[in-house]
Image: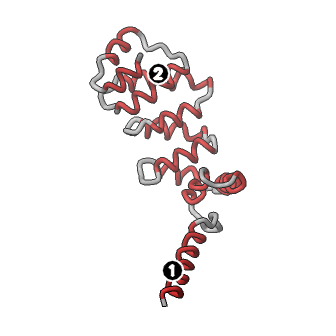
Amino acid sequence: MILPRLITISFVVFFVLALSSVPARAGAHWFDYARQFTGESDKVRENAIESLKKNPDLKSELKKALGTRNHFLALDVISVLDLKSMLPELLTFAAKDKTGYSYHVISSLIEPKDFDRVGQIYLDRLDSAKTSPAAKMAMLDSSARREITLGPERTARLRKDDAPEVRSSVL
């Protein structure tokens, strides 16, 4: 009696696990494909990227996802697909992003022609009390990589920031 029940339970568990690993298919949402960027074979990842590229509404869907529970997936898609055209939306959203992750995505997208403009935005936001410590750290990292000069006054002010991680990052 116990053996048939154990076999049935094992089959159900196997069936559920098998269904959960089925790749996204027709009718799948952009976030279903985005979840295939990691933990899957290269072929599955490539298929997910190609499917996302075919979505005519993708940019508007990603913009709507910023700040939602799919926020990080949206940022991953923007970065993986190299959606430079979304830079204005990202810069707007980043002003209120407490995680700083959007700044890493922005830094992966900016082209040399945008360095000065984005660099100035970063400098202005580094001066703002509304900017989260995580966002300041991301901007300081990017600024150092782009060799953006903070200036002595800003450097001194950031070295006295309330957040120890910002003080450490400015060094």
Mark 2 vs 1: CB contact within 8 A: no
Question: Dot 2, crowdedness within 10 Å: few (<14), some or many (≥20)?
Answer: some
Q: Is residue 60 left or right of residue 169?
A: right
In this rendering, the answer to whether 102 lies above or below 65 is: above
Residue at 61% from the left image edge and 42% from the top image edge: 83
Q: In the displayed image of the protein, which residue is found farthest to the top?
A: 152
Task: Check disc 2 and report its element: helix, strand or loop.
Answer: helix
Q: Which mark is residue 70?
A: none
Q: Where residue 63 sits in the image (x, y, percent)?
A: 50, 48
Q: In the displayed image of the protein, which residue is found farthest to the bottom?
A: 1
Amino acid of disc 1: Ile
Lower sequence index among marks 2 and 1: 1
In this rendering, the answer to whether 96 lies above or below 156 is: below
Residue at 60% from the left image edge and 57% from the top image edge: 33
Colouring style? secondary structure
The residue at which mark 2 appears reads as 120
Q: Nearer the viewer, residue 151 or 1?
A: 1
Task: Check disc 1 and report its element: helix, strand or loop.
Answer: helix
Q: CA distance from mark 2 to mark 1?
A: 60 Å
Q: Where residue 74 sits in the image (x, y, percent)?
A: 52, 49
Residue at 54% from the left image edge and 77% from the top image edge: 10
Residue at 64% from the left image edge and 44% from the top image edge: 81
The residue at which mark 1 appears reads as 9
* Tag in front: 2 or 1: 1
Q: In the displayed image of the protein, which residue is found farthest to the left?
A: 162
In this rendering, the answer to whether 152 lies above or below 64 is: above
Placement of the C terminus among the 4 image quadrants = top left
